[in-house]
Image: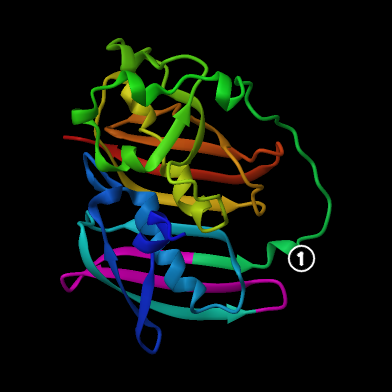
Amino acid sequence: MTFEFDTDTAVERAGEDRFAARLTDRWNTPAGPNGGYVLAVVARALLETVPKPHPISLTGHFLLPPAPGDVEIATELIRTGHRHATARATLSQGGKEVVTALGTFADLAEAKGRDLILEEPPALPAPEEAIDPLGTLDQAMMPPIAGRMDYRVGELPGFALGEPSGRPEFVSWIRFSDGREPDPVALIFLPDGMVPTVFEIGEIVSSTVEMTVHVRAVPAEGWLLMRVRTRFVIGGYHEEDVELWDSSGSLVAQARQLAMLAG
């Protein structure tokens, strides 16, 4: 079976350290292509450049708003060591640089060393016992990305009831709606797969300025449990801090992004 995420993040080699791809509108938010989706496309090109199988840290700076359509990605392998490879990439559209990224790659199967886990997954009813928040919203008003995802929550968020809570924090189960299982490339996108936390303070548009994802482990199959929160909104900018826990209860990804409110 071919999944939408794999089709829509695919890249083709267009020369030495150059790749072609096409951003589709299936991952659009009200502000245009989702930032995590665009960063996942960049990750695909970088994985064709480095001799390691998994992204473990990837940072993207968004220089211009991306749009659906053809893009070019130029990559550069900076260094390869025993454990890590580091590379950079620039995604361009219409002759203009849109995203610049720097990533470190490794083989997560070879990760060995001490573990210390000081947090636990957030408490939430099992997905089959939780609430589908999308079923309560006007489908005609939903952006295309909503049709790509499934969510389950313990209680409906305030914005879905027309009463934003004032607390910009969400806890939700999340997965691809077409049944695609999570993997390290998907973990580049999924931290940005939830509606922005600022919906809970009455803001409905948020655009990514910078996003960093740390992939901590190859995820188990099944739903992922997501906790995302914003603590500071200053001068129209806000952060989103994300944790993703897999169905076995393991932390598999963390992310932070800086985003900008409309206007």
* Residue farthest along the front direction in this orientation: 1
Tell me which residue sits at (51%, 28%) in the image.
172
Q: Which colour scheme is used?
A: rainbow
Name the magenta segment's main secondary structure.
Answer: strand
Tell me which residue sits at (36%, 65%) in the image.
100
According to the picture, the residue beneath numbered tag 1 turns out to be 110
Left-right relation of 159 to 123? left
Which image quadrant for residue 140? top left
- The x, y position of residue 18, in whole percent, is 35, 82
Quadrant of the drawing holding the C terminus: top left
Which image quadrant for residue 4? bottom left
Q: Count the labels in the image.
A: 1
As displayed, is residue 41 above or below residue 144?
below
Q: Which of 229 and 28 is in front in this view?
A: 28
Amino acid type indicated by mark 1: Glu
- The x, y position of residue 128, in whole percent, is 56, 24
Look at the image and give the residue range highlighted in magenta.
Answer: 81-102
Which image quadrant for residue 254? top right
